[in-house]
Image: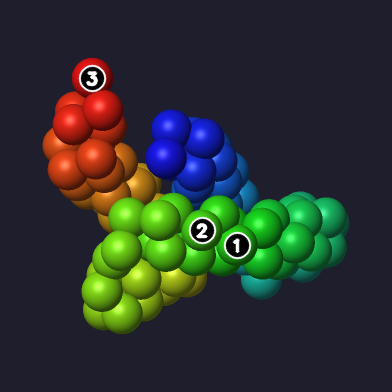
Amino acid sequence: MNGALLRYRIMAYLVGIGLLVLTLVGVPLQYAANRPEVVTVVGPIHGFLYIVYLLAAFDLARRARFSLLQMLAMFCAGFLPFLAFFVEHHVARRVENDYLSQSM
């Protein structure tokens, strides 16, 4: 469970940061300054990392026996800026309280 949680947390942060760079830097540069370079580079990287994030989220949700709604919330966290950090925090606390504290 420790490994699955660590993988999920790393991917949540990477996806969250990538989405913030895209929405707060890349998109304004693309449309306001006609400079699409950031979106061209960061967009595909974010897309790839989101797929890896989905795998990590599914693995953790399966191991922690999350409900379908909880799993859906984890999956949607990569779509809205800042939501990945919020969901990651709550998921990590829940897993640590429910599963990791029992193994000590």
Left or right of 98? Residue 85 is: right
* Nearer to the camera, 66 or 74: 66
Which kind of residue does numbered mark 3 sit on? Met
**Secondary structure under badge 1?**
helix
75 over 53 or under it: above or below: below
Whether residues under marks 2 and 1 lie with C-beta atoms below 8 angstroms apart, the answer is yes
Q: Residue at x 23, y 20 (%)?
A: 104
* Nearer to the camera, 58 or 21: 58
- Residue 46 visible in the displayed image: no
Say whether disc 3 or disc 2 marks the residue closer to the N-terminus.
2
Q: Quadrant of residue 51?
A: bottom right
Say whether disc 1 or disc 3 marks the residue closer to the N-terminus.
1
Return the x and y of residue 65 as percentages of the image width and height. 31, 63
Residue at mark 3 to residue at mark 2: CA–CA distance:
22 Å
Q: How many marks?
A: 3
Q: Can you name the residue that lies furthest to the front here? A: 103
**Secondary structure under badge 2?**
helix
Residue at mark 2 to residue at mark 1: CA–CA distance:
6 Å
Image quadrant occupied by the N terminus: top left
Left or right of 82? Residue 3 is: right
Please tell me how crowded label 2 is: few (under 14), some (14-19), or many (20+) other residues with Cα within 10 Å.
Answer: some
Q: Residue at x 28, y 66 (%)?
A: 66
**Secondary structure under badge 3?**
loop
Left or right of 92? Residue 26 is: right
Please tell me how crowded label 3 is: few (under 14), some (14-19), or many (20+) other residues with Cα within 10 Å.
Answer: few
Q: Name the mark on residue 55.
A: 1
Q: Residue at x 51, y 58 (%)?
A: 59
Residue identified by numbered label 2: 59
Residue identified by numbered label 3: 104
Which kind of residue does numbered mark 1 sit on? Leu
Which kind of residue does numbered mark 2 sit on? Asp
Q: Residue at x 19, y 28 (%)?
A: 101
